[in-house]
Image: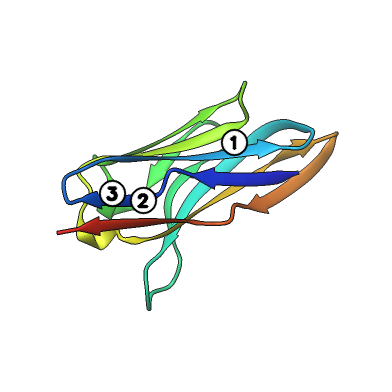
Amino acid sequence: VQLQASGGGLVQAGGSLRLSCAASGGVDSITAAGWYRQAPGKQRELVADITSGGNINYVESVKGRFTASRNHGLNTVYLQMDSLRPDDTAVYYCNARGFANGEYYDLWGQGTLVTVSS
């Protein structure tokens, strides 16, 4: 089982990006997931948390600008990022938990760089 993250890049302030994180390799489901980010010199922080109950919680700084979602059929989670700001610049990571071939997994994607220019 592996997670493949994609969608990062360079964007001007006010722009948008959509990150994707696809689970593959016998995956039955993504039960819960999270999007994290780590800016240079800072600790990794949880940006959006998709719970097993389907609730989505956001860190205060991205509320109203970022939208996390999950496609069960594609075993993929997304992070739509709008109204991007320079302080959103970071490496973004996805974490997914679920079942593959009947066994539980808890995996991290490889990280994708988002750079927002002013």
Q: Residue furthest front?
A: 10
Q: Residue furthest bottom?
A: 41
| Residue type at the position of mark 1 | Ser
CA gap, disc 2 and disc 1: 29 Å
Q: Residue furthest top?
A: 73
In what quadrant of the picture does the N terminus appear? top right
Label annotation for residue 62: 3
Q: Residue at x 38, y 78 (%)?
A: 41
CA gap, disc 3 and disc 2: 18 Å
Q: Secondary structure at mark 2?
A: strand
Question: Which sits earlier in the primary sequence, circle 3 or circle 1?
Answer: 1
Question: Which sits earlier in the primary sequence, circle 2 or circle 1?
Answer: 2
Q: Nearer the viewer, residue 76 or 12?
A: 12
Toward which corner of the image does residue 17 lie, by quadrant? top left
Tell me the mark number nearer the camera, choosing from 3 and 1.
Answer: 3
User: What x and y, as percent, mark residue 43?
Assistant: 43, 72
Residue that label 1 marks: 52
User: What x and y, as percent, mark residue 30?
Assistant: 65, 35
Q: Secondary structure at mark 3?
A: helix
Question: Which sits earlier in the primary sequence, circle 3 or circle 2?
Answer: 2
| Residue type at the position of mark 2 | Gly
Q: Is residue 37 above or below residue 51?
A: below
Q: Is residue 113 above or below residue 6?
A: below
Residue that label 2 marks: 9
User: What x and y, as percent, mark residue 48?
Assistant: 42, 47
Q: Is residue 69 left or right of residue 33?
A: left
Q: Secondary structure at mark 1?
A: loop
Q: Residue at x 34, y 52 (%)?
A: 59
Q: Residue at x 19, y 50 (%)?
A: 12
User: What x and y, as percent, mark residue 8?
Assistant: 40, 49
Toward which corner of the image does residue 22 lie, by quadrant? top right
Toward which corner of the image does residue 88 lie, by quadrant? bottom left
